[in-house]
Image (tube, helix red, strand yellow):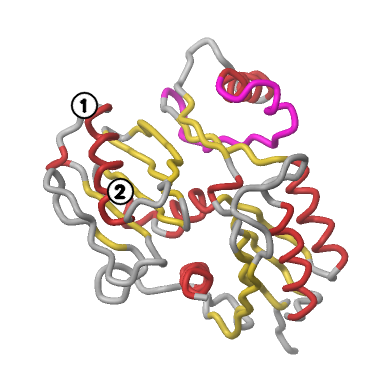
Amino acid sequence: MSLSWRNRVHVLLARERVALGRLGRGYGDTLKSRHVQPCSGAAEPAAGRSAWDDAMRALDAALRAFDCRRAEATVILSNAFARFQVVPWHDQIGWGAERGAYVRHGFQRVYGDDVRGWDVRVSDEGHGAPAVAAAVDRDLLAAISGAARQHGIAVVSVQPYLMWAINRWRTALRAGDFCLALVETGEVCTVLRAGGSWRAVKVAPMNGREPQAFVGELVERELCLAGLDPERIKVYVRAPQQGGFEMRSDGLPPCTVLGESGRAPGMQVGDALFAAAAQS
């Protein structure tokens, strides 16, 4: 009797480029080969075009250049392609459809009628606890599914970068209160957890600012707004664009850089793809 596994690939979809990585057969997380495809468009989409149009064209080109047929794909979306909120617990709101409507209403209060075209998911934190919700354009999800079918790929998971990172480093993030900052090209996503509950989540544009200083200011501001003592909060940063990242802040202790050898758990396939995409 012989055992076999399907080919597995990870796909990173960002505004500037798309990265594909093929994993080894079996249950490991070893990256065997990869391909990075730049997006041809500008950082800001033209009128009448979606923010992810250029990324989807790059995905099609990447799948033509990097044969992934008969593979199972995990797709990681840049945080620029998602919206996030912390959803407070409400004793009068039940589960199922009622909770879904409650979460969607929270997005609608901020983003208006655009939320009608979004797929909204919420983390399961249990009774009485705030949760983190993510919303992604359904048209983007449909476009990813269509491209996968065209190239003979089975999509098994689509995750915003934030959710992927929380799952990736869940062991490190379990220890006490923390603020996690995910640095991408042009923006930083921060999520804050304290007292066993999610407190805040935000994606902020850097507008050309230097990342080390911007991350420090952003984290300090979030802790101040939440009324938390910086000395009691562990700060984690993932910044594949910045080798040897050191957060610049007089009011915060040194941060822990995730995914850098010797400072945190070593790189896995998703980490390697972000690093490859950042350096190409």
Picture layout, residue 220 above or below residue 249: above
Please state which of residues 149 and 15 is positioned toward the viewer in this rendering: 15
Give the residue number, with chain letter if any, for mark 2.
214
> The disc labelled 1 sits on which kind of residue?
Gly
Q: Is residue 41 above or below residue 195?
A: below
Q: Quadrant of residue 239?
A: bottom left
**Whole-percent x and y of residue 69?**
80, 76
**Residue holding disc 1:** 227
Q: Quadrant of the N terminus?
A: bottom right
Rate crowding at label 1 as few (under 14), some (14 to 19) or many (20 or more) other CA atoms within 10 Å.
few
In the image, is residue 117 part of the stretch drawn in magenta?
Answer: yes
Q: Earlier in the sequence, mark 1 or mark 2?
A: 2
Q: Position of residue 136 (x, y in %)?
A: 65, 41
Residue sitting farthest toward the top: 92
Residue, far bottom: 1
Residue under the image location 75 percent in, 45 percent down: 49
Q: In the picture, residue 236 is in which quadrant?
A: bottom left
Residue count near mark 2 (Cα–Cα under 10 Å), binned few <14, some 14–19, many ≥20? many
Which residue is pictured at 33% across the width and 72% down the height?
A: 243
Asked whether disc 1 touches disc 2, contact meaning CB atoms under 8 Å apart, the reply is no
Task: Determine the CA span between mark 1 and mark 2.
Answer: 20 Å
Amino acid type of disc 2?
Phe
Task: Provide the residue span drawn in magenta.
Answer: 110-128
Q: Position of residue 20 (x, y in %)?
A: 64, 73
